[in-house]
Image (cartoon, helix red, strand yellow):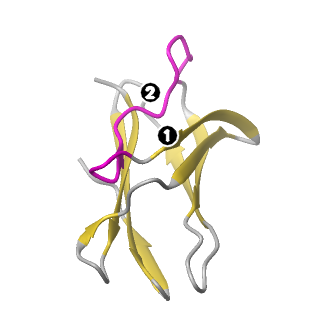
Amino acid sequence: MSGISTHILDTSAGKPDVGILVHLFRADALVNSLITNTDGRVPALLPHGFEFTAGTYRLLFEVQGPFFPEVTIVFEVKDALAHYHVPLLLSPYGYSTYRGS
């Protein structure tokens, strides 16, 4: 199954980050905006009917933290038949990410 998903974990609290607004862009065009669910996930960021193609994508997370008001992750889609899971591990003064499965 192809597509893009994300998951936000608040590492300082040891729990999912619920209710965070996440925007997905392809190049500079807004593709979709969704809010993390009760498990801190957005399981499907691509809207129905969207043509998923190779290219540069950007996730913008409106985290409203004490130091980072937002976090941006830019990544490259090489294979539009693959699934891209991009988790965000968040703490008040830092964050990390990786390509998940």
**Considering depth in this image, is 85 or 12 the residue closer to the camera?**
12
Q: Distance between the residues labelled 2 and 1?
A: 7 Å
Asked whether the beta carbons under mark 2 and mark 1 sit within 8 Å of each other, the answer is yes
Q: Residue at position x 37%, y 62% from top?
A: 17
Identify residue type, mark 2.
Answer: Ala
Residue 80 marker: 2
Residue 37 image position (x, y, % from top left): 36, 45
Was residue 40 drawn as part of the magenta stretch in this picture? yes
Residue that carries the numbered disc 1 in the rendered image: 77
| Circle 2 crowding by C-alpha within 10 Å: few under 14, some 14–19, many from 20 | some
**What's the magenta region?**
37-52
Residue 92 image position (x, y, % from top left): 47, 85
Apparent side of residue 1 relative to residue 17 in the rendered image (left or right): left
Residue 31 vertical position relative to residue 16 in the rendered view, above or below:
above
Q: Name the element at disc 2.
A: loop
Identify residue type, mark 1.
Answer: Val
